[in-house]
Image (cartoon, rainbow, N blue to C red):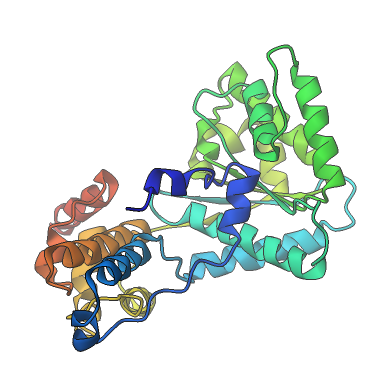
Amino acid sequence: MPDTAAEGTGRHLTTLTGWRQFAVDPPAPPTLLTAAEYAALPAPDKYLYDEARLDHHARLLVVATSTVRHTVATGRRLVVLNRHAISARRGLIVSGPAGTGKTIAITQLGLAHELLDRSRHPHSQDRIPVLYVTLPPAATARMIAAEFARFLGLPVRARFNITDIIEAVVGVCTDARTGLVLVDELHNISLTSRNGAEVADTLKYFSERIPATFIYAGIDIEGSTLLSGTRGAQIAGRFTLIPTHPFPYNREWKGLVAQIENTLLLHQHEPGSLAALDRYLHDRTGGMIGALSHVIRGAAIDAMLTGTEKITERGLKAIPLDFAAQEATTAKPRAAR
């Protein structure tokens, strides 16, 4: 059987190895066999075929939502505008409720930048076009510097002070032509605490020393302390904000459901039957793209494991959702009263 633990090793986006694996095209999905072709498979081949389909449905499908397209377009524009800037580079903040696709948006921007850089420098092995880190809760300035170093694979010894770490990171990023720095979970910073203020100052210092465009993502940043006070005013004066939100029930939502349905590899699934449930899916998920992806992929996996090989409303109802999506769903009837 496949060693799924070993397969997942090193795939974290917060390491250079993991990011580079992310930037490699995913394997092509298996071809959906007819009932006769499937029945004729020897048992070992049938197992491998089903495992490939399970893996396909388990992958996080990225759909080109309006938020993703807007983030990629805005970010690429900023990269060009910052190309010759020597200070006060402009940046981008993607902000909104949990489950509205912020991380997907900034990582797709990073992927677009990475692939463009590779196409322009196909024979260069020492470039690191994108750096991606997440901010841990209650982080200190040294912890943030260490996260940057960890992505790059730089050693961080106990005896190293923060200046040593920062200088090493800046040196590598400058030499490796890093052009985009993605910082996720920005909401873990609070400017009302000393540590939070120092973290904000460290990020600002990185942005001044590394000749790159900085992209932040976090939950409801516009309502936090990050854009208030003297430090907040500096951030607000340099960063464009893209809000994310649950999708309304409209043409785009219907298109998202149809896009995901087109990727299903189930033997008994009738095309269009999932799209016919787009209203139910919107009511169930509260318009959250993360919850939509989860419930459909979960139902597809259940359909394979149970042998039904199709997604039904009953199968979708059997998939538990995250608390935020459930709250959004239960809040609708109360709001309508």
Q: Quadrant of the C terminus?
A: bottom left
Q: Is residue 269 visible?
A: no
Give the image quarter of residue 132. top right
**Residue 197 image offset from top left, x and y in percent:** 64, 24
Q: Tell me if residue 221 comes above or below residue 163 in the rendering.
A: below
Q: Tell me if residue 281 comes above or below residue 205 in the rendering.
A: below
Find the residue positioned furthest to the top. Answer: 159
**Residue 15 image offset from top left, x and y in percent:** 61, 42
Residue beneath the point at 50% across and 65% down: 67
Q: 129 or 18: nearer the eye?
A: 18
Horizontal relation, residue 211 to residue 145: left or right: right
Q: 174 or 214: nearer the eye?
A: 174
> How many numbered badges does the structure rendering display?
0
Q: 181 or 325: nearer the eye?
A: 181
**Residue 42 image offset from top left, x and y in percent:** 24, 74
Give the image quarter of residue 245. bottom left
Residue beneath the point at 69% across and 62% down: 113
Q: 236 or 213: nearer the eye?
A: 213
Q: Is residue 125 visible?
A: yes
**Residue 44 image offset from top left, x and y in percent:** 27, 67
